Image (cartoon, rainbow, N blue to C red):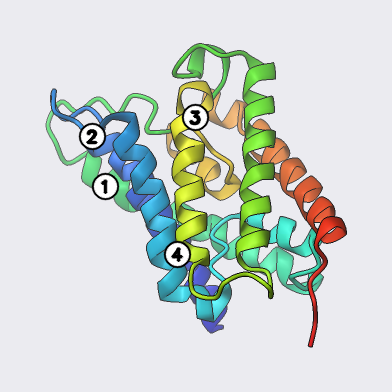
């Protein structure tokens, strides 16, 4: 059970820290941390957990990552569904804690509560095609970096840094398009509390990341198969 508990805690932290920075600190009040700060928060949440629980569960924190690692031959099929379940539950728990804190201020306007969206719910007004494309491509690159940084031939001890910085860069590029998902658990957790349009658009933030992760897994397994001792 330890690996499932670790994934739950790790995903909770990613959602609470990453989305929390967007909800509580991005524009507070005129000296907020902005897009750059939110991007760093997501990257740092993964980096910190990589060294905290990486040795326990692998620190996936993301259904797309779990599926991509399976496609790359790095993760057993029988563990995929249990990992996804605890990741989604951990994300919901993180969002629930954030909601409890955020609603503790009189007259607070939660806005979109850091939910992901396209069209009129895209921060920059980008359409469905743009949203799908950016989520697919960014998740593809994210998995390529993960698979490379954790390869048996990669320098040991540095994977967390590479992966955390990659997620930071992904957010720097794609926050204006979709508010950046590349993680179905993160998207689901916020959509549950927003409801309405966020739940209606949630399909994209499952389909595009998973498709991008699958492509990355199969591609990386072809160009650089894992060497088993």
Is 91 located above or below residue 51 in the figure?
Answer: above
Is 97 located above or below residue 177 in the figure?
Answer: below
User: Which residue is denoted by mark 1 in the rendering?
Assistant: 100
User: Which residue is denoted by mark 3 in the rendering?
Assistant: 173
Estimate the spatial distance between the alpha carbons at disc 2 and disc 4, rounded to whole Å.
23 Å
| Residue depicted at 72% across the width and 62% down the height | 69
- Quadrant the N terminus occupies: bottom right
Q: Looking at the image, can residue 179 be seen?
A: no
The local secondary structure at tag 1 comes to: helix
Category of crowding for the residue at label 3, using alpha-carbon neighbours closer than 10 angstroms: few (below 14), some (14–19), many (at least 20): some
* Residue mark closest to the camera, 4 vs 3: 3
User: Which residue is denoted by mark 4 in the rendering?
Assistant: 10
Estimate the spatial distance between the alpha carbons at disc 3 and disc 1, rounded to whole Å.
30 Å
Residue 201: name its quadrant. Answer: top right
* Residue mark closest to the camera, 2 vs 1: 2
The local secondary structure at tag 2 comes to: loop
Estimate the spatial distance between the alpha carbons at disc 2 and disc 1, rounded to whole Å.
21 Å
User: Quick one: which residue is furthest to the right in this view?
Assistant: 222
The numbered mark, 4 or 1, whose residue comes first in the sequence reads 4
Could you tell me if the residues under marks 4 and 1 are in contact, i.e. CB atoms within 8 Å?
no
Category of crowding for the residue at label 2, using alpha-carbon neighbours closer than 10 angstroms: few (below 14), some (14–19), many (at least 20): some
The local secondary structure at tag 4 comes to: helix
| Residue 96, x across and y down, in percent | 36, 50
User: Which residue is denoted by mark 2 in the rendering?
Assistant: 33
Could you tell me if the residues under marks 2 and 3 are in contact, i.e. CB atoms within 8 Å?
no
């Amino acid at each position: 059970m330890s690996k499932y508990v670790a994934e739950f805690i790790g995903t909770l932290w990613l959602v609470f820290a990453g989305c929390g920075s967007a909800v509580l600190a991005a524009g507070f009040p005129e000296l907020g941390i902005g897009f750059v700060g939110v991007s760093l928060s997501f990257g740092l949440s993964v980096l910190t957990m990589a060294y905290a629980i990486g040795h326990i569960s692998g620190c996936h924190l993301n259904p797309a990552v779990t599926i991509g690692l399976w496609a790359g031959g790095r993760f057993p099929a029988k563990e995929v569904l249990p990992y996804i379940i605890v990741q989604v539950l951990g994300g919901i728990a993180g969002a629930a804690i954030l909601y409890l804190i955020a609603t503790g201020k009189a007259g607070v306007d939660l806005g979109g509560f850091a939910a992901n969206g396209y069209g009129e719910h895209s921060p920059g007004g980008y359409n469905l095609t743009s949203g799908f494309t950016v989520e697919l491509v960014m998740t593809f690159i994210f998995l390529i970096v993960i698979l490379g940084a954790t390869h048996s031939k990669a320098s040991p001890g540095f994977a967390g840094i590479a992966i955390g910085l990659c997620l930071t860069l992904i957010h720097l590029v794609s926050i204006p398009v979709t508010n950046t998902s590349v993680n179905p658990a993160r998207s689901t957790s916020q959509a549950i509390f927003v409801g309405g349009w966020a739940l209606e658009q949630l399909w994209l933030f499952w389909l595009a990341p998973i498709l991008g992760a699958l492509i990355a897994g199969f591609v990386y397994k072809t160009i650089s198969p894992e060497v088993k001792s």
